[in-house]
Image (cartoon, rainbow, N blue to C red):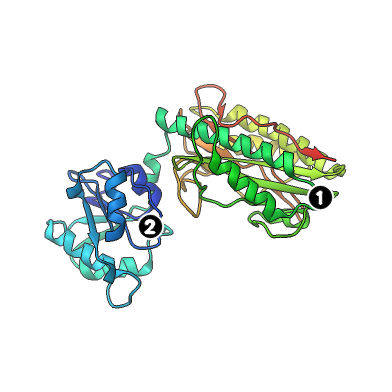
C-alpha cells in the first residue's frame, strides 16, 4: 500500500476479504468490503444480517465489524457506500488517497459513484490487484488446504470414470461430481468450487466454458471434465478427457503433443525462471506436432469465490516476465480448443527450487472407456 501511495484500501473482492480477515459467507451479492489503512484495520463492513457471520469467522474484535441496515439493500434511494463514506469521514480519512479495486467483479459503477459523491476530497487510485499479488506465494497452511483439495479432485475424477457410460444423462453425472466434491475425503470435507463443472461433449468441446445439460453421453464421443476440488475455499483444478469407445487418431495425436508439451513446461516451472518460460516450452512442443494455442496456458490459484478460481495476477503466456517464486501455485492449463473438438489434460502445481510439486495425482492421459 505504501509503495503504491495508498493510504486507505477498500477491498471488495470476497477472496481478498477472506484472506485479510478470515470472513467466509455467501453475502457477496450485496455491498461489502474490508477497510485497511497503513496503521488501522482490517475492518469488515457489510450488511447487518451478515455481521453475525463476520463475528463468527473474522479474527478481529467486534469493534472492527461494522454494518449497514437492510433499508440500504436493493434500493435506488440510497447505497451502502453512502454510509461507508460517512464512516470514513468520521474517522478522519476523507482526504486520503483511497485505493479501490476498479476492475473487480464486485466493484460496481454505482459503488464507485457513491464513494466519489460521499468523499469529494478524497483521491481515488486503482488498487485492483494490490491484495491479489500478496497472495501469490502460499504459506505452509495454505498448501495443506490445497493438497487436501487435490485429494478431493482425485476422488472426483475417479468417480467420473467409474460411472460414465453411453446413455447416462450429464446432469446425473454432475450430481455425482458434486456429491463427491462436497463429501470430501480422508476425514475432511469439501467446499463448493468457485466455478461449476465444465462438461462438454463432441463438438461442444471446441468451446472452453460450456457447463452441462440433461442429454445422454454418446458412444464414440469425447468429453472433457474441467473441475476442482475445494477445501476451506482453497482450490485444486484438474482437467481430464474421456473418450467412450475407440478414439480417432486426432485424439491420440493431441494426447501425445499435450503430454510431451506438459513435460517440457513442467521442466521450466521452477523458482527463478519466468512465467513465460513455462508456456514457451509448452508451445514449442505443440508447434512441433502441428498444434497452436493462442490463449494463455495457466494462471495462479488458491483461495477463491465465484465466479473464478484464478487469482487474476500472473498469466502463463508469452510476455509475462514475472519471476517465479517458491510456493507460488498454478493451474497449468494445457487445453486445446480446435475448430470442432477439444481436448483437456491439465495439472495444478507448486513452484519449488527444482521440479514442481503436483497438487493432485491422477493418471495424466486420455482416458478411454469402451
Q: Does the image show residue 318?
A: no
Percent of width and height locating residue 78 = 27, 74
Percent of width and height locating residue 102 = 37, 59
In which quadrant of the rendered view does residue 93 lie? bottom left
Residue ID for mark 2:
27
The residue drawn where x is 55% and y is 40% is 183
Question: Callout 2: few (<14), some (14-19), or many (20+) C-alpha neighbours within 10 Å?
Answer: some
Question: Callout 1: few (<14), some (14-19), or many (20+) C-alpha neighbours within 10 Å?
Answer: some
* Left or right for 52, reference 323: left
Percent of width and height locating residue 195 = 54, 51
State the residue in front, 92 or 49. 49
Q: Is the C terminus in the top left, top right, bottom left or bottom right quadrant?
A: top right
Q: Does the image show residue 188?
A: yes
The residue drawn where x is 60% and y is 41% is 180
Does dot 1 land on a helix, a strand or a loop? loop
Up the image or down, 256 lies above or below 295; here it is above
Residue ID for mark 1:
166
Up the image or down, 115 lies above or below 316; here it is below
In which quadrant of the rendered view does residue 89 lie? bottom left
Percent of width and height locating residue 213 = 69, 60
Measure how far apart labels 2 and 1 are at the Cα level: 40 Å
Amino acid at each position: 500500500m505504501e509503495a503504491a501511495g495508498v493510504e486507505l484500501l477498500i477491498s471488495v473482492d470476497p477472496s481478498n476479504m477472506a484472506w485479510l480477515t478470515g470472513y467466509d459467507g455467501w453475502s457477496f451479492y450485496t455491498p461489502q468490503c474490508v477497510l485497511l489503512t497503513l496503521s488501522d484495520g482490517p475492518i469488515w463492513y457489510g450488511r447487518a444480517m451478515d455481521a453475525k457471520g463476520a463475528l463468527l469467522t473474522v479474527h478481529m474484535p467486534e469493534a472492527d465489524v461494522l454494518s449497514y441496515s437492510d433499508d440500504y439493500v436493493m434500493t435506488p434511494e440510497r447505497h451502502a457506500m453512502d454510509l461507508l463514506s460517512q464512516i470514513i469521514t468520521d474517522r478522519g480519512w476523507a482526504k486520503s488517497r483511497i485505493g479501490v479495486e476498479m476492475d473487480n467483479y464486485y466493484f460496481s459503477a454505482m459503488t464507485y459513484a457513491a464513494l466519489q459523491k460521499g468523499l469529494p476530497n478524497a483521491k481515488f487510485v486503482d488498487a485492483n490487484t494490490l491484495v491479489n499479488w500478496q497472495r501469490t506465494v502460499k504459506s505452509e497452511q495454505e498448501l495443506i488446504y490445497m493438497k487436501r483439495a487435490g485429494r478431493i479432485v482425485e476422488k472426483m475424477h475417479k468417480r467420473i470414470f467409474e460411472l460414465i457410460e453411453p446413455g447416462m444423462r450429464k446432469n446425473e453425472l454432475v450430481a455425482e461430481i458434486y456429491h463427491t466434491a462436497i463429501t470430501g475425503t480422508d476425514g475432511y470435507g469439501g467446499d463448493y468450487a468457485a466455478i461449476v463443472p465444465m462438461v462438454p461433449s463432441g463438438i461442444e468441446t471446441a468451446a472452453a466454458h460450456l457447463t452441462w445439460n440433461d442429454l445422454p453421453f454418446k458412444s464414440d464421443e469425447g468429453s472433457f471434465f474441467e473441475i476442482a476440488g475445494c477445501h476451506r475455499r482453497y482450490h485444486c483444478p484438474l482437467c481430464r478427457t474421456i473418450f467412450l469407445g475407440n478414439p480417432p487418431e486426432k485424439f491420440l495425436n493431441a494426447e501425445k503433443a499435450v503430454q510431451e508439451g506438459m513435460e517440457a513446461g513442467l521442466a521450466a516451472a521452477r523458482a527463478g525462471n519466468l512465467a513465460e518460460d513455462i508456456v514457451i516450452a509448452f508451445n514449442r512442443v505443440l508447434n512441433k506436432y502441428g498444434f497452436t494455442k493462442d490463449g494463455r496456458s495457466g494462471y495462479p490459484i488458491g483461495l477463491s469465490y465465484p465466479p473464478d478460481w484464478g487469482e487474476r495476477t500472473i498469466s502463463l503466456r508469452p510476455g509475462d516476465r514475472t519471476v517465479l517464486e517458491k510456493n507460488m501455485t498454478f493451474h497449468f492449463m494445457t487445453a486445446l480448443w480446435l475448430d470442432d473438438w477439444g481436448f483437456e489434460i491439465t495439472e495444478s502445481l507448486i513452484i519449488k527450487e527444482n521440479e514442481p510439486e503436483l497438487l493432485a495425482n491422477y493418471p495424466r492421459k486420455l482416458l478411454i472407456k469402451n
